Protein backbone atom coordinates (compact mmCIF):
# COMPACT_ATOMS: atom_id res chain seq x y z
CA UNK A 1 0.00 0.00 0.00
CA UNK A 2 1.33 3.37 -0.91
CA UNK A 3 -0.05 6.82 -1.66
CA UNK A 4 0.08 8.65 -4.98
CA UNK A 5 3.50 9.96 -5.97
CA UNK A 6 4.09 13.48 -4.66
CA UNK A 7 1.55 13.07 -1.87
CA UNK A 8 1.89 15.97 0.56
CA UNK A 9 2.61 14.58 4.03
CA UNK A 10 2.98 17.25 6.66
CA UNK A 11 1.43 18.95 9.65
CA UNK A 12 -0.79 21.91 10.56
CA UNK A 13 -0.89 24.73 13.11
CA UNK A 14 -2.52 28.15 13.61
CA UNK A 15 -0.84 31.43 14.57
CA UNK A 16 -2.77 32.25 17.73
CA UNK A 17 -2.34 28.73 19.08
CA UNK A 18 1.44 28.50 18.81
CA UNK A 19 3.21 31.79 18.12
CA UNK A 20 2.95 33.78 21.34
CA UNK A 21 4.78 37.11 21.01
CA UNK A 22 1.32 38.65 21.06
CA UNK A 23 2.60 42.21 21.31
CA UNK A 24 5.86 41.86 19.43
CA UNK A 25 6.78 43.05 16.00
CA UNK A 26 4.00 45.64 15.99
CA UNK A 27 1.25 43.04 16.35
CA UNK A 28 -2.21 44.27 17.32
CA UNK A 29 -4.72 42.60 19.64
CA UNK A 30 -6.74 39.86 18.04
CA UNK A 31 -9.88 38.19 19.39
CA UNK A 32 -8.08 35.13 20.76
CA UNK A 33 -5.76 37.45 22.71
CA UNK A 34 -8.62 38.43 25.00
CA UNK A 35 -9.70 34.84 25.61
CA UNK A 36 -8.86 33.50 29.02
CA UNK A 37 -9.62 29.93 28.02
CA UNK A 38 -10.36 28.47 24.61
CA UNK A 39 -11.37 30.74 21.80
CA UNK A 40 -14.98 30.08 22.71
CA UNK A 41 -14.45 31.74 26.09
CA UNK A 42 -13.87 35.45 25.94
CA UNK A 43 -12.56 37.59 28.73
CA UNK A 44 -15.29 38.59 31.15
CA UNK A 45 -15.32 42.33 30.94
CA UNK A 46 -15.39 44.68 28.04
CA UNK A 47 -13.24 47.28 29.81
CA UNK A 48 -10.54 46.74 30.68
CA UNK A 49 -10.29 44.02 28.08
CA UNK A 50 -7.19 42.53 29.60
CA UNK A 51 -7.19 42.01 33.31
CA UNK A 52 -3.94 42.08 35.25
CA UNK A 53 -2.77 38.65 36.42
CA UNK A 54 -5.11 36.65 34.17
CA UNK A 55 -3.71 33.81 32.06
CA UNK A 56 -4.27 34.32 28.36
CA UNK A 57 -3.06 31.18 26.51
CA UNK A 58 -2.29 32.90 23.21
CA UNK A 59 0.03 35.50 24.76
CA UNK A 60 2.98 33.10 25.00
CA UNK A 61 1.49 29.92 23.49
CA UNK A 62 4.57 27.77 22.71
CA UNK A 63 6.78 30.73 21.78
CA UNK A 64 7.03 29.66 18.17
CA UNK A 65 7.47 33.33 17.28
CA UNK A 66 11.02 33.05 18.61
CA UNK A 67 11.59 29.36 17.88
CA UNK A 68 10.14 28.82 14.43
CA UNK A 69 13.52 27.91 12.94
CA UNK A 70 14.04 25.16 15.48
CA UNK A 71 10.47 23.93 14.93
CA UNK A 72 10.66 23.88 11.15
CA UNK A 73 13.99 22.04 11.37
CA UNK A 74 12.19 19.37 13.43
CA UNK A 75 9.40 19.18 10.83
CA UNK A 76 12.07 18.76 8.17
CA UNK A 77 13.64 15.91 10.17
CA UNK A 78 10.30 14.11 10.01
CA UNK A 79 10.41 14.64 6.26
CA UNK A 80 7.45 17.04 5.94
CA UNK A 81 6.52 17.85 2.37
CA UNK A 82 3.94 20.46 3.41
CA UNK A 83 3.43 22.74 6.38
CA UNK A 84 0.05 24.37 6.91
CA UNK A 85 0.16 27.45 9.14
CA UNK A 86 -1.83 30.65 9.42
CA UNK A 87 -0.77 34.26 9.12
CA UNK A 88 -1.96 36.36 12.05
CA UNK A 89 -4.00 39.16 10.50
CA UNK A 90 -2.96 41.42 13.40
CA UNK A 91 0.74 41.03 12.59
CA UNK A 92 0.10 42.41 9.11
CA UNK A 93 -2.68 44.89 9.96
CA UNK A 94 -2.60 45.44 13.74
CA UNK A 95 -6.07 46.99 13.84
CA UNK A 96 -7.31 45.37 10.66
CA UNK A 97 -8.36 48.59 8.96
CA UNK A 98 -5.03 50.33 8.21
CA UNK A 99 -4.20 51.05 4.60
CA UNK A 100 -0.57 50.01 4.73
CA UNK A 101 0.68 46.67 6.05
CA UNK A 102 3.11 46.35 8.94
CA UNK A 103 6.49 45.56 7.39
CA UNK A 104 7.78 43.74 10.46
CA UNK A 105 4.88 41.29 10.30
CA UNK A 106 5.40 40.68 6.60
CA UNK A 107 9.11 40.04 7.23
CA UNK A 108 8.39 37.54 9.98
CA UNK A 109 6.29 35.32 7.71
CA UNK A 110 8.67 35.80 4.82
CA UNK A 111 11.44 34.39 6.95
CA UNK A 112 9.20 31.54 8.14
CA UNK A 113 8.25 30.71 4.55
CA UNK A 114 11.91 30.86 3.44
CA UNK A 115 12.76 28.46 6.23
CA UNK A 116 10.17 25.98 4.89
CA UNK A 117 11.42 26.35 1.33
CA UNK A 118 15.00 25.78 2.48
CA UNK A 119 13.95 22.23 3.40
CA UNK A 120 11.72 21.70 0.38
CA UNK A 121 8.57 22.02 2.48
CA UNK A 122 5.59 23.43 0.54
CA UNK A 123 3.77 26.07 2.60
CA UNK A 124 -0.02 26.05 2.77
CA UNK A 125 -1.30 29.29 4.28
CA UNK A 126 -4.60 29.73 6.10
CA UNK A 127 -5.41 33.40 5.63
CA UNK A 128 -7.83 33.62 8.54
CA UNK A 129 -7.68 30.93 11.20
CA UNK A 130 -10.04 31.74 14.08
CA UNK A 131 -8.64 35.22 14.28
CA UNK A 132 -10.27 38.62 13.76
CA UNK A 133 -8.53 41.84 14.84
CA UNK A 134 -10.26 42.80 18.09
CA UNK A 135 -10.47 46.39 16.91
CA UNK A 136 -12.83 45.29 14.12
CA UNK A 137 -14.99 43.43 16.62
CA UNK A 138 -15.35 46.59 18.66
CA UNK A 139 -15.80 48.82 15.63
CA UNK A 140 -18.19 46.78 13.50
CA UNK A 141 -18.99 43.57 15.38
CA UNK A 142 -16.67 41.57 13.15
CA UNK A 143 -18.02 39.79 10.09
CA UNK A 144 -21.59 40.89 10.84
CA UNK A 145 -20.59 44.07 8.98
CA UNK A 146 -20.01 44.16 5.23
CA UNK A 147 -17.10 46.58 5.54
CA UNK A 148 -15.03 43.62 6.78
CA UNK A 149 -14.78 42.44 3.18
CA UNK A 150 -12.54 45.33 2.13
CA UNK A 151 -10.27 44.94 5.16
CA UNK A 152 -9.92 41.23 4.48
CA UNK A 153 -9.14 41.84 0.81
CA UNK A 154 -6.55 44.43 1.73
CA UNK A 155 -4.93 41.79 3.93
CA UNK A 156 -5.09 39.25 1.09
CA UNK A 157 -3.54 41.68 -1.34
CA UNK A 158 -0.63 42.38 1.00
CA UNK A 159 0.23 38.71 1.44
CA UNK A 160 -0.60 37.56 -2.11
CA UNK A 161 1.79 40.13 -3.55
CA UNK A 162 4.52 39.76 -0.96
CA UNK A 163 4.77 35.95 -1.06
CA UNK A 164 4.28 35.54 -4.79
CA UNK A 165 6.53 32.80 -6.13
CA UNK A 166 7.02 31.34 -2.64
CA UNK A 167 3.55 30.18 -1.58
CA UNK A 168 1.20 28.31 -3.90
CA UNK A 169 -1.61 26.99 -1.66
CA UNK A 170 -3.97 29.32 0.21
CA UNK A 171 -7.07 28.69 2.33
CA UNK A 172 -9.49 31.58 2.74
CA UNK A 173 -11.10 30.75 6.13
CA UNK A 174 -10.45 28.01 8.63
CA UNK A 175 -13.51 25.84 9.34
CA UNK A 176 -15.83 28.45 7.87
CA UNK A 177 -18.84 26.24 8.63
CA UNK A 178 -18.24 26.52 12.38
CA UNK A 179 -20.31 29.72 12.09
CA UNK A 180 -23.41 27.64 11.36
CA UNK A 181 -23.28 26.83 15.10
CA UNK A 182 -23.41 29.34 17.98
CA UNK A 183 -19.79 28.63 18.98
CA UNK A 184 -18.52 29.97 15.65
CA UNK A 185 -19.88 33.48 16.11
CA UNK A 186 -17.01 34.84 18.14
CA UNK A 187 -14.46 32.14 17.44
CA UNK A 188 -14.48 32.43 13.70
CA UNK A 189 -16.30 35.69 12.92
CA UNK A 190 -15.37 37.99 15.81
CA UNK A 191 -19.07 38.61 16.40
CA UNK A 192 -20.27 39.59 19.86
CA UNK A 193 -24.00 39.64 20.33
CA UNK A 194 -26.27 41.30 22.79
CA UNK A 195 -24.77 40.68 26.21
CA UNK A 196 -27.17 40.05 29.04
CA UNK A 197 -24.70 40.72 31.84
CA UNK A 198 -21.11 41.90 32.08
CA UNK A 199 -20.08 38.35 31.23
CA UNK A 200 -19.31 37.83 27.55
CA UNK A 201 -20.28 34.18 27.91
CA UNK A 202 -23.78 35.34 28.64
CA UNK A 203 -24.41 36.29 25.06
CA UNK A 204 -27.71 35.88 23.32
CA UNK A 205 -26.89 33.97 20.18
CA UNK A 206 -28.05 35.78 17.09
CA UNK A 207 -28.12 33.37 14.15
CA UNK A 208 -28.99 36.22 11.82
CA UNK A 209 -25.65 37.85 12.54
CA UNK A 210 -23.80 34.59 11.98
CA UNK A 211 -25.45 33.84 8.64
CA UNK A 212 -25.09 37.46 7.52
CA UNK A 213 -21.44 37.17 8.55
CA UNK A 214 -21.11 33.99 6.51
CA UNK A 215 -22.51 35.75 3.46
CA UNK A 216 -19.84 38.44 3.83
CA UNK A 217 -17.20 35.74 4.20
CA UNK A 218 -18.44 33.95 1.06
CA UNK A 219 -18.22 37.17 -0.93
CA UNK A 220 -14.78 37.90 0.54
CA UNK A 221 -13.61 34.37 -0.23
CA UNK A 222 -14.83 34.51 -3.85
CA UNK A 223 -13.18 37.89 -4.40
CA UNK A 224 -9.97 36.59 -2.81
CA UNK A 225 -9.93 33.62 -5.22
CA UNK A 226 -10.22 35.99 -8.15
CA UNK A 227 -7.58 38.34 -6.76
CA UNK A 228 -5.19 35.45 -6.17
CA UNK A 229 -5.55 34.20 -9.74
CA UNK A 230 -5.06 37.74 -11.10
CA UNK A 231 -1.88 38.21 -9.06
CA UNK A 232 -0.46 34.80 -9.87
CA UNK A 233 -2.18 32.26 -12.15
CA UNK A 234 -0.29 29.52 -10.31
CA UNK A 235 -2.05 30.27 -7.06
CA UNK A 236 -4.41 27.56 -5.82
CA UNK A 237 -7.04 28.71 -3.36
CA UNK A 238 -9.10 26.33 -1.27
CA UNK A 239 -11.95 26.31 1.21
CA UNK A 240 -11.60 24.72 4.64
CA UNK A 241 -14.47 22.98 6.42
CA UNK A 242 -15.01 20.97 9.59
CA UNK A 243 -16.16 17.63 8.27
CA UNK A 244 -18.67 16.54 10.89
CA UNK A 245 -19.54 13.13 9.53
CA UNK A 246 -22.84 11.99 10.96
CA UNK A 247 -25.06 8.93 10.79
CA UNK A 248 -28.73 8.45 11.54
CA UNK A 249 -28.91 6.88 15.01
CA UNK A 250 -31.39 4.30 13.72
CA UNK A 251 -32.79 3.34 10.34
CA UNK A 252 -36.03 5.05 11.29
CA UNK A 253 -36.69 7.41 8.36
CA UNK A 254 -37.38 10.16 10.91
CA UNK A 255 -33.78 9.89 12.12
CA UNK A 256 -32.53 9.69 8.57
CA UNK A 257 -34.20 12.92 7.48
CA UNK A 258 -32.92 14.76 10.56
CA UNK A 259 -29.46 13.48 9.77
CA UNK A 260 -29.74 14.71 6.19
CA UNK A 261 -30.91 18.15 7.29
CA UNK A 262 -28.14 18.50 9.88
CA UNK A 263 -25.65 17.37 7.28
CA UNK A 264 -26.90 19.94 4.80
CA UNK A 265 -26.46 22.72 7.31
CA UNK A 266 -23.18 21.68 8.88
CA UNK A 267 -21.28 19.80 6.21
CA UNK A 268 -22.49 21.01 2.87
CA UNK A 269 -23.95 24.50 2.96
CA UNK A 270 -20.65 26.43 3.09
CA UNK A 271 -18.71 24.17 0.76
CA UNK A 272 -21.62 24.13 -1.71
CA UNK A 273 -21.37 27.92 -1.90
CA UNK A 274 -17.58 27.96 -2.06
CA UNK A 275 -17.15 25.04 -4.47
CA UNK A 276 -20.18 25.53 -6.70
CA UNK A 277 -20.42 29.32 -6.54
CA UNK A 278 -24.05 29.59 -5.48
CA UNK A 279 -26.37 29.08 -2.54
CA UNK A 280 -27.99 25.63 -2.44
CA UNK A 281 -31.81 25.50 -2.45
CA UNK A 282 -32.14 23.64 0.85
CA UNK A 283 -30.62 26.55 2.79
CA UNK A 284 -33.33 28.90 1.56
CA UNK A 285 -35.91 26.74 3.30
CA UNK A 286 -33.76 26.62 6.44
CA UNK A 287 -33.55 30.42 6.47
CA UNK A 288 -37.31 30.69 6.03
CA UNK A 289 -38.15 28.15 8.73
CA UNK A 290 -35.75 29.82 11.17
CA UNK A 291 -36.63 33.46 10.41
CA UNK A 292 -33.18 34.24 9.12
CA UNK A 293 -32.86 37.10 6.67
CA UNK A 294 -29.57 37.49 4.87
CA UNK A 295 -29.09 40.75 3.07
CA UNK A 296 -27.37 40.34 -0.30
CA UNK A 297 -26.29 43.18 -2.56
CA UNK A 298 -27.05 43.17 -6.27
CA UNK A 299 -24.08 41.56 -7.98
CA UNK A 300 -23.23 39.21 -5.09
CA UNK A 301 -24.52 36.24 -7.07
CA UNK A 302 -22.10 37.04 -9.88
CA UNK A 303 -19.21 37.44 -7.45
CA UNK A 304 -19.91 34.01 -5.94
CA UNK A 305 -20.26 32.44 -9.37
CA UNK A 306 -16.95 33.93 -10.49
CA UNK A 307 -14.93 32.78 -7.47
CA UNK A 308 -15.33 29.07 -6.76
CA UNK A 309 -12.35 27.56 -4.96
CA UNK A 310 -9.74 25.42 -6.72
CA UNK A 311 -9.67 22.66 -4.15
CA UNK A 312 -11.42 21.39 -1.04
CA UNK A 313 -9.90 20.89 2.40
CA UNK A 314 -11.29 19.81 5.74
CA UNK A 315 -10.51 18.92 9.29
CA UNK A 316 -11.69 15.53 10.47
CA UNK A 317 -11.57 14.38 14.08
CA UNK A 318 -14.76 12.50 14.90
CA UNK A 319 -18.26 11.58 13.86
CA UNK A 320 -21.61 11.66 15.61
CA UNK A 321 -25.18 10.40 15.29
CA UNK A 322 -28.39 12.31 14.73
CA UNK A 323 -31.83 11.46 15.94
CA UNK A 324 -35.33 12.87 15.77
CA UNK A 325 -35.76 11.92 19.44
CA UNK A 326 -35.53 15.19 21.36
CA UNK A 327 -35.02 13.34 24.64
CA UNK A 328 -31.72 11.74 23.67
CA UNK A 329 -28.78 13.57 25.19
CA UNK A 330 -26.14 15.31 23.18
CA UNK A 331 -22.65 13.74 23.40
CA UNK A 332 -20.54 15.03 26.27
CA UNK A 333 -17.73 17.28 25.15
CA UNK A 334 -18.42 16.59 21.50
CA UNK A 335 -18.31 20.10 20.05
CA UNK A 336 -20.27 19.01 17.05
CA UNK A 337 -23.33 18.01 19.03
CA UNK A 338 -25.34 14.99 18.01
CA UNK A 339 -25.67 11.87 20.12
CA UNK A 340 -23.00 9.26 20.87
CA UNK A 341 -22.57 6.35 18.51
CA UNK A 342 -22.80 3.06 20.46
CA UNK A 343 -20.23 1.44 18.15
CA UNK A 344 -17.44 3.95 18.74
CA UNK A 345 -14.97 4.80 21.48
CA UNK A 346 -14.23 8.41 22.40
CA UNK A 347 -11.16 10.46 23.29
CA UNK A 348 -10.71 11.89 26.79
CA UNK A 349 -12.65 14.92 25.58
CA UNK A 350 -15.60 12.88 24.31
CA UNK A 351 -14.68 13.12 20.62
CA UNK A 352 -15.78 9.85 19.04
CA UNK A 353 -13.05 8.13 17.07
CA UNK A 354 -14.17 6.93 13.64
CA UNK A 355 -11.54 6.25 10.96
CA UNK A 356 -14.06 4.67 8.59
CA UNK A 357 -16.08 7.88 8.75
CA UNK A 358 -13.13 9.60 7.09
CA UNK A 359 -13.21 7.23 4.11
CA UNK A 360 -16.98 7.62 3.93
CA UNK A 361 -16.82 11.42 3.90
CA UNK A 362 -13.91 11.64 1.47
CA UNK A 363 -16.00 9.64 -0.99
CA UNK A 364 -18.98 11.92 -0.49
CA UNK A 365 -16.89 15.07 -0.95
CA UNK A 366 -15.28 13.74 -4.10
CA UNK A 367 -18.61 12.60 -5.58
CA UNK A 368 -20.09 16.01 -4.90
CA UNK A 369 -17.38 18.39 -6.09
CA UNK A 370 -14.80 16.52 -8.18
CA UNK A 371 -12.09 18.83 -6.86
CA UNK A 372 -8.74 17.81 -5.35
CA UNK A 373 -8.98 17.19 -1.61
CA UNK A 374 -6.54 17.68 1.26
CA UNK A 375 -7.19 16.52 4.82
CA UNK A 376 -5.58 19.47 6.58
CA UNK A 377 -6.41 18.56 10.18
CA UNK A 378 -6.77 15.25 11.96
CA UNK A 379 -5.38 13.92 15.18
CA UNK A 380 -5.90 12.83 18.74
CA UNK A 381 -5.93 15.30 21.62
CA UNK A 382 -4.56 13.36 24.59
CA UNK A 383 -2.87 13.72 27.97
CA UNK A 384 0.79 12.87 27.29
CA UNK A 385 3.41 12.35 29.92
CA UNK A 386 7.17 12.24 29.98
CA UNK A 387 8.34 8.86 31.33
CA UNK A 388 11.22 8.48 33.76
CA UNK A 389 13.56 7.68 30.91
CA UNK A 390 12.55 10.94 29.23
CA UNK A 391 10.42 9.33 26.53
CA UNK A 392 6.87 10.22 25.56
CA UNK A 393 5.23 6.93 24.55
CA UNK A 394 2.14 8.04 22.66
CA UNK A 395 1.20 4.72 21.07
CA UNK A 396 -2.51 5.71 21.38
CA UNK A 397 -1.80 8.61 19.01
CA UNK A 398 0.04 6.34 16.59
CA UNK A 399 -2.96 3.98 16.61
CA UNK A 400 -5.33 6.84 15.89
CA UNK A 401 -3.27 8.24 13.04
CA UNK A 402 -2.48 4.83 11.56
CA UNK A 403 -6.14 3.86 11.37
CA UNK A 404 -7.06 7.16 9.71
CA UNK A 405 -4.24 6.88 7.20
CA UNK A 406 -5.39 3.35 6.35
CA UNK A 407 -8.87 4.66 5.64
CA UNK A 408 -7.52 7.54 3.56
CA UNK A 409 -5.73 4.93 1.52
CA UNK A 410 -8.99 3.03 1.05
CA UNK A 411 -10.51 6.28 -0.20
CA UNK A 412 -7.66 6.68 -2.68
CA UNK A 413 -8.37 3.14 -3.91
CA UNK A 414 -12.04 4.14 -4.20
CA UNK A 415 -10.88 6.76 -6.68
CA UNK A 416 -10.85 9.88 -4.49
CA UNK A 417 -8.36 12.52 -5.65
CA UNK A 418 -6.63 13.00 -2.29
CA UNK A 419 -3.53 15.17 -2.47
CA UNK A 420 -2.23 15.60 1.06
CA UNK A 421 -2.49 15.06 4.78
CA UNK A 422 -1.41 17.57 7.42
CA UNK A 423 -2.30 16.26 10.90
CA UNK A 424 -3.27 18.89 13.44
CA UNK A 425 -0.93 20.35 16.02
CA UNK A 426 2.15 18.59 14.67
CA UNK A 427 3.88 20.28 17.58
CA UNK A 428 1.97 20.62 20.89
CA UNK A 429 0.04 23.87 21.04
CA UNK A 430 -2.87 25.58 22.78
CA UNK A 431 -6.25 23.93 22.29
CA UNK A 432 -8.76 26.09 20.42
CA UNK A 433 -11.84 24.88 22.25
CA UNK A 434 -10.50 24.71 25.80
CA UNK A 435 -7.36 26.86 25.87
CA UNK A 436 -5.48 23.98 27.48
CA UNK A 437 -1.91 22.88 26.85
CA UNK A 438 -2.83 19.56 28.46
CA UNK A 439 -4.79 18.58 25.36
CA UNK A 440 -1.82 17.65 23.18
CA UNK A 441 -1.75 16.58 19.55
CA UNK A 442 1.90 16.86 18.60
CA UNK A 443 4.69 14.62 17.38
CA UNK A 444 6.81 17.02 19.41
CA UNK A 445 6.23 17.57 23.12
CA UNK A 446 6.55 21.14 24.37
CA UNK A 447 7.32 21.78 28.03
CA UNK A 448 4.65 24.30 28.69
CA UNK A 449 1.89 23.66 31.19
CA UNK A 450 -1.50 25.14 32.06
CA UNK A 451 -0.24 26.80 35.23
CA UNK A 452 2.12 28.88 33.09
CA UNK A 453 5.24 26.87 33.99
CA UNK A 454 7.63 25.10 31.61
CA UNK A 455 10.69 26.24 29.71
CA UNK A 456 9.23 25.69 26.20
CA UNK A 457 11.83 23.02 25.42
CA UNK A 458 10.97 20.58 22.63
CA UNK A 459 11.18 16.76 22.83
CA UNK A 460 10.45 14.13 20.18
CA UNK A 461 7.64 11.75 21.06
CA UNK A 462 7.52 8.12 19.85
CA UNK A 463 5.04 9.26 17.21
CA UNK A 464 7.76 11.52 15.77
CA UNK A 465 9.87 8.53 14.74
CA UNK A 466 6.80 6.63 13.55
CA UNK A 467 5.56 9.49 11.35
CA UNK A 468 9.04 9.97 9.89
CA UNK A 469 8.95 6.34 8.72
CA UNK A 470 5.43 6.76 7.33
CA UNK A 471 6.56 9.72 5.24
CA UNK A 472 9.80 8.02 4.12
CA UNK A 473 7.83 5.08 2.77
CA UNK A 474 4.98 7.22 1.35
CA UNK A 475 2.51 5.57 3.69
CA UNK A 476 3.61 1.99 3.09
CA UNK A 477 5.17 1.30 6.49
CA UNK A 478 2.49 2.08 9.02
C1 LIG B 1 -10.11 22.68 14.84
C2 LIG B 1 -9.39 23.97 14.71
C3 LIG B 1 -8.04 24.01 15.28
C4 LIG B 1 -7.77 23.04 16.38
C5 LIG B 1 -8.48 21.73 16.30
C6 LIG B 1 -8.46 20.88 17.54
O1 LIG B 1 -11.45 22.90 15.08
O2 LIG B 1 -9.29 24.40 13.37
O3 LIG B 1 -7.71 25.34 15.50
O4 LIG B 1 -7.48 23.54 17.58
O5 LIG B 1 -9.80 21.86 15.89
O6 LIG B 1 -9.39 21.36 18.45
P1 LIG B 1 -9.05 21.61 19.96
O7 LIG B 1 -7.86 22.48 19.98
O8 LIG B 1 -10.23 22.25 20.53
O9 LIG B 1 -8.79 20.26 20.54
Image: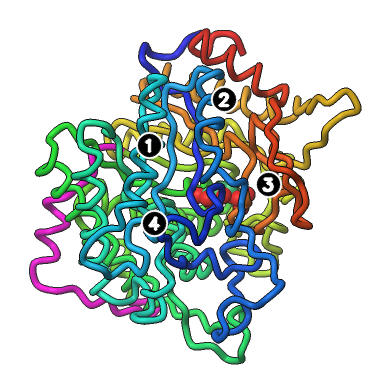
**Does 153 sit left or right of 345 as displayed?**
left
Spatial CA span between label 4 and label 3: 42 Å
Q: Are marks 2 and 4 in contact (CB under 8 Å)?
A: no
Question: Quick one: label 2 or label 4, which is nearer the N terminus?
Answer: 2
Image coordinates of residue 242 in percent, x first then y, are 47, 49
| Residue at (52, 25) in percent of width and height | 73
**Does 172 sit left or right of 37 as displayed?**
left
| Residue at (58, 55) in percent of width and height | 432
Which element type, helix, strand or loop, lies under badge 3?
Answer: loop
Spatial CA span between label 1 and label 4: 14 Å
Would the CB of label 2 be found within 8 Å of ligand 1?
no
Question: Given this view, does label 4 or label 3 mark the residue nearer the observer?
Answer: 4
From the image, tell me which residue sits under label 3.
Answer: 341
Quarter occupied by residue 343: top right
Q: Are marks 1 and 2 in contact (CB under 8 Å)?
A: no
Image coordinates of residue 332 in percent, x first then y, are 72, 58
Could you classify mark 1 by the number of other residues whose Cα lies within 10 Å: few (under 14), some (14-19), or many (20 or more)?
Answer: few
Could you classify mark 2 by the number of other residues whose Cα lies within 10 Å: few (under 14), some (14-19), or many (20 or more)?
Answer: some
Would the CB of label 1 be found within 8 Å of ligand 1?
no
From the image, tell me which residue sits under label 1.
Answer: 111
Amino acid sequence: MSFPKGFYWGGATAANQLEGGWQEGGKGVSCPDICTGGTATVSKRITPVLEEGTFYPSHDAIDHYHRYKEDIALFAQMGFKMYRFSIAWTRIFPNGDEEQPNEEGLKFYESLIDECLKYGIEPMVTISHYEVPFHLTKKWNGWADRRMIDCYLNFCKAIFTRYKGKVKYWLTFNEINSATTPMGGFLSQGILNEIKTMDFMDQVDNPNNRFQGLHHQFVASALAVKMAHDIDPNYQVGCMQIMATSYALTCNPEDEIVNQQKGHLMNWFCSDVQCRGKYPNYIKRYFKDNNITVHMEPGDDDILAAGPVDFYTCSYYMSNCQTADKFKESGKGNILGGVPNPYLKASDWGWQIDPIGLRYSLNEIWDRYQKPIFVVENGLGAYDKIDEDGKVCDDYRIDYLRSHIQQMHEAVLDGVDLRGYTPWGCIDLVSASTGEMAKRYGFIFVERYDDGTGDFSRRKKESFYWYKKVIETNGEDL
